[in-house]
Image (cartoon, grey):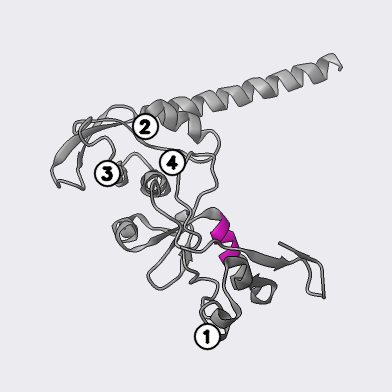
Amino acid sequence: MSTALYITVTLLIFIGLLFAIHHLVRTYLRYRGLRIITCPDTTRPAFVEVDALHAALTSTVGMTDIHLKQCSRWPLQQECGQECLAQIDAASEQDQVSGVLMRWYQGKQCVYCGHEFKPLHWLDDKPALQSPEGKLLEWHQVPRESLETVLNDYLPVCWNCYLVQFFHSQYPGMVVYQPYKHGFSGSDVARGTAEQSPVGTLSSSQPVTFEVAASSGPGGRIV
């Protein structure tokens, strides 16, 4: 490597580090310190502090993960859903929504496959939501002002089922639900027990198996 190229690469790395450090410090300063919020559970004021260092570090990869570091109602109510994050005015609207939803899924079950959600992490594929009308939404489609309605009325959808539902909506002829793989008998199918449970309304008590066509022609299917 020539001297000029070496110096250029070194300068680029140095400039990149400066920008990263500036971004980290700016995000940290934005979230640090105590704040007064209205607790959604008691509708009374409470003091909270966001984990500013975690928020700053996660912001470097494109998604700021905000969660509380401490609250005046802890430790008695430490297992709350942290819905008050929607009131953190330093956060962007999307960060507020993501911060609340990250904890909302825990312990719930996917409405399609019945999979129980484990604690989500900021690098995980994000699950989706199903509205009372059956519409699927991703997190970025949830406005902050509708967050309370979403938490009360919407249903959780795991990432895998969301992909299946999305694919089925785009290519309905290429996704086949196979009832015989779930213990349905021929009489069940004849009565419509299985066939009348279309993609999108499958019972969460049954495991989900789909066959996705790899091409529009005959054959070429993967399970």
- In this image, 198 relative to 42: left or right? right
Q: Nearer the viewer, mark 4 or mark 3?
A: 4
Q: Residue reaching furthest bottom?
A: 190
Q: Nearer the viewer, mark 3 or mark 2?
A: 3
Q: Is residue 18 above or below residue 165?
A: above
Relative depth, front residue between 199 and 187: 187
Residue occupied by mark 3: 84
How much space separates mark 1 and mark 2, taking CA atoms?
Answer: 60 Å
Q: Residue reaching furthest top?
A: 3
Residue drawn at x 43%, y 29% as measured from the top left: 54
Q: Are the residues at dot 4 and dot 3 in contact (C-beta closer than 8 Å)? A: no
Q: Residues within 10 Å of mark 1 (few under 14, many from 20)?
A: few
How much space separates mark 3 and mark 1, taking CA atoms?
Answer: 48 Å
Q: Secondary structure at mark 3?
A: helix
Q: Nearer the viewer, mark 1 or mark 2?
A: 1
Task: Say whether residue 94 is magenta.
Answer: no
Residue occupied by mark 2: 30
Q: Are the residues at dot 4 and dot 2 in contact (C-beta closer than 8 Å)? A: no
Q: Secondary structure at mark 2?
A: helix
Q: Amino acid at mark 4?
A: Pro
- In this image, 134 relative to 196: left or right? left
Q: Nearer the viewer, mark 3 or mark 1?
A: 1
Residue occupied by mark 4: 119
